[in-house]
Amino acid sequence: MDAETDPVKAAQLLRVPHPAAADRLFVLAPLADLAPGLIPPGWHETVETARRRQASVEAPDAIRPLGDWDAIEGRWRRTSAAPQPR
C-alpha cells in the first residue's frame, strides 16, 4: 500500500532480519520459542538473549500467548487470554 504513495519505499529491498527485529519483543518472543539459540545475521546475541533483554525493558503485558499446542490432538488451542473470533 505504501508503495503506491511512496515510490522510495517501492524501490527498497526486503531486509531479513528486519533491522529493528532485535528490539521488538513481539518478534523475539515467538522466535525464541522456535529457535532460542539462533544468532541471526548481523546480531551479536542469540534470539533468547535478545528476548530476555527486551523483556526487561518492555511492560510485562507487552506479549501474551494466544494459544497452546495440543500434541494429542495435533492442533493449536486458544488460551483464555486470546480474543474470541467475531
Image (cartoon, grey):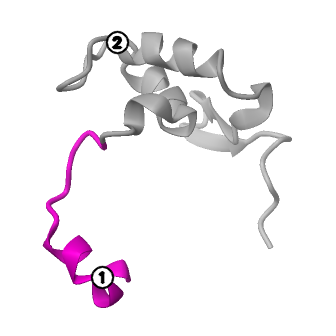
Q: Residue at x 65, y 21 (%)?
A: 57
Classify residue 33 as left or right of residue 36.
Answer: right
| Amino acid type shown at disc 2 | Thr
Is residue 13 inside the magenta stretch? Answer: yes
Quarter occupied by residue 54: top right
Q: Which residues are magenta?
A: 1-18
Q: Residue at x 70, y 42 (%)?
A: 66
The total of numbered circles placed on residues is: 2
**Vertical order, 5 against 45 (above or below):** below
The residue at which mark 1 appears reads as 6
The quadrant of the rendering that contains the N terminus is bottom left
The percent coordinates of residue 79 (x first, y second) are 78, 39
Mark 1 vs 2: CB contact within 8 A: no
Classify residue 82 as left or right of residue 52.
Answer: right
Quarter occupied by residue 9: bottom left
Farthest residue to the bottom: give it.
4
The percent coordinates of residue 42 (x first, y second) are 19, 25
Instruction: Specify few, some or many for label 2: CA neighbours under 10 Å numbering under 14, 14-19, or 20 or more.
Output: some
The residue at which mark 2 appears reads as 46
The quadrant of the rendering that contains the C terminus is bottom right
Q: Residue at x 56, y 32 (%)?
A: 25
Query: Depth-wise, is mark 1 or mark 2 nearer the camera?
Result: 1
Farthest residue to the right: give it.
80
The percent coordinates of residue 53 (x first, y second) are 54, 14
Q: CA distance from mark 1 to mark 2?
A: 35 Å
Residue 29: image tag: none
| Amino acid type shown at disc 1 | Asp
Viewer-closest of 76 and 23? 23
The percent coordinates of residue 45 (x first, y second) are 32, 11
